[in-house]
Amino acid sequence: NSGPQGTTVTLAFVGAAEAVTATRPAVSDRRKPRVLLVDDDVSLREVYRVLLERAGWEVAQASDSDRALQIAAVEPVDSILVDVQMSGRDGVAIVEALATWHPHLVNRVALHTGYAAEERVRMMADRYGLPVIQKPCKFALLLKTLQDLVARAGAPGNPGGAVG
């Protein structure tokens, strides 16, 4: 359910273990691919963290835009999953800040939202060529989107842009 306080998501993980096993990312000798999860819903971040780590990813987390931008500025990230509707500065503000201060990271962003049909979300996605994942989503779709971002960026966790 979506409302002024953000999105409430109910997650059902039927078959999630099979999706994790079937879609492990390609990993270089240097490190695993790393995703930054930006969402003010701590339970959603924790579920995604556990599932992504089981799928072979390193996971960084931020509950707000300021922390997300701090992490992106100093830590390597291969993909960034950004919730649009958050208290304070929202996901759109994160994308705009990345485009200004860290433009090389914009092509690593996916918007994860219950507001995928909103005009401002579509405009942001079109402007920067960002994938948009409607909440709730199947975990296999989330993994595929993150792998595609790693391949698009040619990140070290995915040499040669191959998706594993």
Image (spheres, helix red, strand yellow):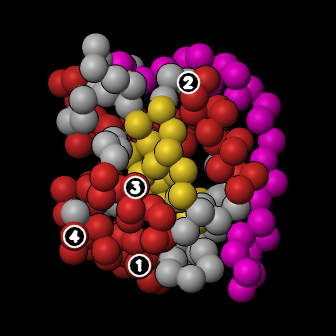
From the top left corner, tell me how far across and down residue 7 is, in percent.
Answer: 71, 70
Q: What stretch is highlighted in magenta?
A: 1-27
In the rendered view of the protein, which quadrant contains the N terminus?
A: bottom right
Q: Which amino acid does label 1 sit on?
A: Ala
The nearer-to-camera label among 3 and 1 is 3
| Residue for point 41% across, 37% down | 34
Q: Is residue 6 magenta?
A: yes
Which comes sooner in the sequence, label 4 or label 1?
1
Q: Is mark 3 on a helix, strand or loop?
A: helix
In the rendered view of the protein, which quadrant contains the C terminus?
A: top left
Q: Is residue 162 above or below residue 100?
A: above
Disc number placed over residue 93 in the picture, else none: 1
Q: Which residue is disc 3 drawn over?
A: 71
Q: Which residue is disc 4 drawn over?
A: 101
Q: Which residue is disc 2 drawn over?
A: 55
Q: Calculate the distance from the C-alpha at mark 3 to the C-alpha at mark 4.
A: 13 Å
